Image (cartoon, rainbow, N blue to C red):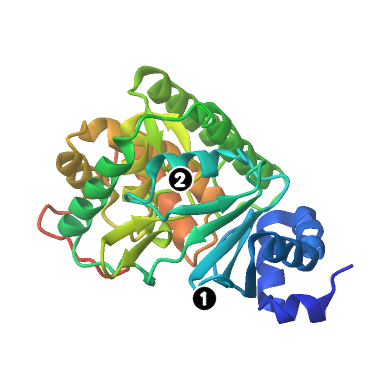
Amino acid sequence: MLDRAALSALGVDESTVALRERLDGVDAHAFLAALPALVARWQDRFGLHGARLLGGGALSAAFACVRLVDAAPVVLKLSAPHAPGVGAEAAALAAWGGEGACALLDAAADGEALVLERIEPGTPASAADDASDARAAAALLGTLHAVPPPSAVPTWQLEGDWRFERARTWVATGRAVAAVTLAELDEAGRTARELHDSGSRVLCHGDFLDKNLLLDGARGLRAIDPMPCVSDRSRDAAFWALHHQPGVYVGERCELVARAAGLDGARVRRWALAFAATEAALDIAPGAAQRHLGFLRAARSGVAARSPARRLDPRPQ
């Protein structure tokens, strides 16, 4: 049973409840039901007040708070018990130490509650053009990938198995956003596993897309909300290329970000095609899933997936 009044006081409205139900089914209700008590507990534990829900997140809830000791604006992030790799986020953020990502200020021992630096103004990076956006993404990846992976961060198999299994479940239960098939997901899973097994090993962000790349007025582009894993350097670059204006010139963006980051463009594109299958099932942004599926099927059928070389129009299609 949800305490609607208590949730409303935290900024959780009916549309947020509906979105969480869409993303996480029955697990969403259990997490939402526990949320008011969890927020009260962790605000008291960390010396915070004024929690108000921030947007985004399917397996966590982030709240804008104020720290009592110095009135500093911070973020309290609470992860659902069923979220994959709980604890890995804290380990990755601690390893990055505020360079290229938000700083970790405090954490529960199990990593289910984190106090994070509040990035200001904290707006997602706006699209300029694909070439300059790719250079900015590659520069940030260079910073994140340069840090040795801590032992608490799992290899990609945990995050990858979770993502592909979630997509398969959505297809099997009729929840998939676009009509990707189980056969397409299986083929994509085999490709992703081969790329992981044959690739480099760096500390990957794991969910490197525009909504998790925020502008810091003093320090430029910085990352939030990682689903960290140890995997191939090309993995994060491909995820960015696929999601940056979904379905629009993905092949070109793979080449652009690969060139900027010193990666193999063909390898980045293969990762992007593998993720296109999962995101066709899971991406609920308007029209995004259909565009992911279109990119996947155009490539599989041999249709040129690259648009004309001079058409790097940043506007959504």
Residue 126 in picture, x, y percent from top left: 29, 69
Q: Secondary structure at mark 1?
A: loop
Q: Which residue is mark 2?
A: 93
* Disc 1 versus disc 2: nearer the observer: 1
Report which quarter residue 22 is drawn in. Answer: bottom right
Residue 92 in picture, x, y percent from top left: 46, 40
Q: Any mark on residue 71, and which?
A: 1
Q: Any mark on residue 4, and which?
A: none
x 59%, y 72%: residue: 68
Residue 181 seen in this snapshot? yes
Report which quarter residue 23 is drawn in. Answer: bottom right
Q: What crowding class fits label 2: few (fewer than 14 Cα within 10 Å), some (14-19), or many (20 or more)? A: many
Give above or below for 245 relative to 227.
below
The amino acid type found where label 1 is placed reads Ala
Q: Quadrant of the C terminus?
A: bottom left
Q: Secondary structure at mark 2?
A: helix
